[in-house]
Image (cartoon, rainbow, N blue to C red):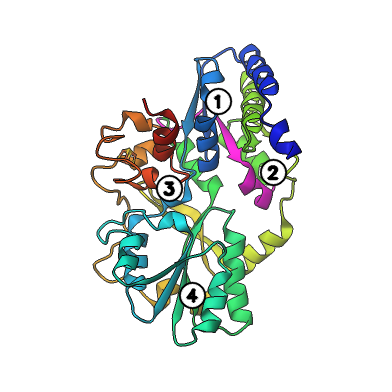
Amino acid sequence: MRHLTEYSDPGGIRALAANIARISKRPARIMEVCGGQTHAILRHALDTLLPPHVQLLHGPGCPVCVTPSAYLDHAIAVARRPDVILTTFGDLLRVPSESSGDLYAAKARGADVRMVTSPLQALDFARANPDKEVVHLAIGFETTAPANALLAYLAKERGLPNVSLLVSQFLVPPILRAICADPETAPDAFLAAGHVCAIMGSDPYVSLARELNRPIAITGFEPADILLGIRDVLRLFEAGRAEMINSYPRIVHPQGNPEAQRIMAAVFDVSNREWRGLGVVPMSGLSLRPEYAAFDAAIRFPAPKTIVYKQLNDAPECPAAAVLLGKLQPPDCPHFGGRCTPDHPLGAPMVSPEGPCAAFYLHRRA
Ligand code: SF4
């Protein structure tokens, strides 16, 4: 409780906002790449505390939003098999696929789709249902990769042949490189997600800041954490220093979590990965290593020929790619709050609890 009150104390927040106003002298566009931070910024109206020349951009940090819709079509096709139990976190259930509806609808029509809070629950289902295939939807960034890797590792170690993973794991640094390669999307500075760095450590971001020629502040999730990250990254920006600063040292350590990194490296290889609406970004994801091929649901249940993983496969009327790259603010989408609401979403950014459109709808609707 102490940390919760300490990092949301109104007096401290006001002092930080005043500090930022003193430090910031020139226009700055700062991108966070974490749906949790996007929601915290809007829920606490932190953007309204900043000088008008400091703009916050909301990048592709919502894992559900960047999962390709063809992946969901593939997942739904697998779920419809009578011999399959499909396990997933709840936030994927209502994300529209390209042509098959969503997992909720598939479940309503009889598919055995089970919501889990840990990938390891798939092991229990597999043991209890030896005549069924248990397929887990392994999506997310570096934060979910260790638990998904552990599922594959334990399934192999315990000789559970009826477990497999349909993998769509993403890595943050390659997408930051892709964003910076396009002058239209490149921000002046980044806030890096504290939970990703808790796994991978702050050290990799030292060279990344130099490579991107932009400051990066590793940032937490409470209101004061986020303002601390903004303050620290603005200090570097104003001084013209393309460096990393760890503004979340109570959680993030230089080497991160070596155990988590070990299990990830044992199970996954770095690979090309398709991002919804953004296309294939080279070496921006994780795939199961060849020695785990027997646990790869994409091999065990190949996508039907009608499902095509392709370069850009967003729903035609949903400009999610522009939103996820910070080119379009959600309220400027012509469908925001009209044809597209959390009850009737046109795209993933309105569905996910981490999606930027849902964040604006919940916290900033006129
Ligand atoms: S408001 Fe809806 S249609 Fe517009 S970008 Fe967001 S999810 Fe897509």
Judge whether 248 appears above or below 64 on screen.
above
Picture disc at residue 46: 1
- Cα distance between the residues tagged 1 and 4: 42 Å
Q: Quarter for ligand 1?
A: top left
Circle 4 residue: 164
Label 4: how many residues lie within 10 Å, few (<14), some (14-19) or many (20+)?
many
What is the quadrant of the N terminus in the image?
A: top right
Label 2: how many residues lie within 10 Å, few (<14), some (14-19) or many (20+)?
many
Residue segment shown in magenta: 184-202
Would you say residue 191 sits in the magenta stretch? yes
Name the amino acid type tagged 4. Answer: Ser
Give the foreground label among 2 and 3: 3
Name the amino acid type tagged 2. Answer: Ser
Would you say residue 58 sits in the magenta stretch? no
- Cα distance between the residues tagged 4 and 3: 24 Å
Residue at left 66%, top 32%?
Answer: 225
Q: Is residue 151 left or right of residue 72?
A: right
Q: Ligand 1 within 8 A of label 3's CB?
A: no
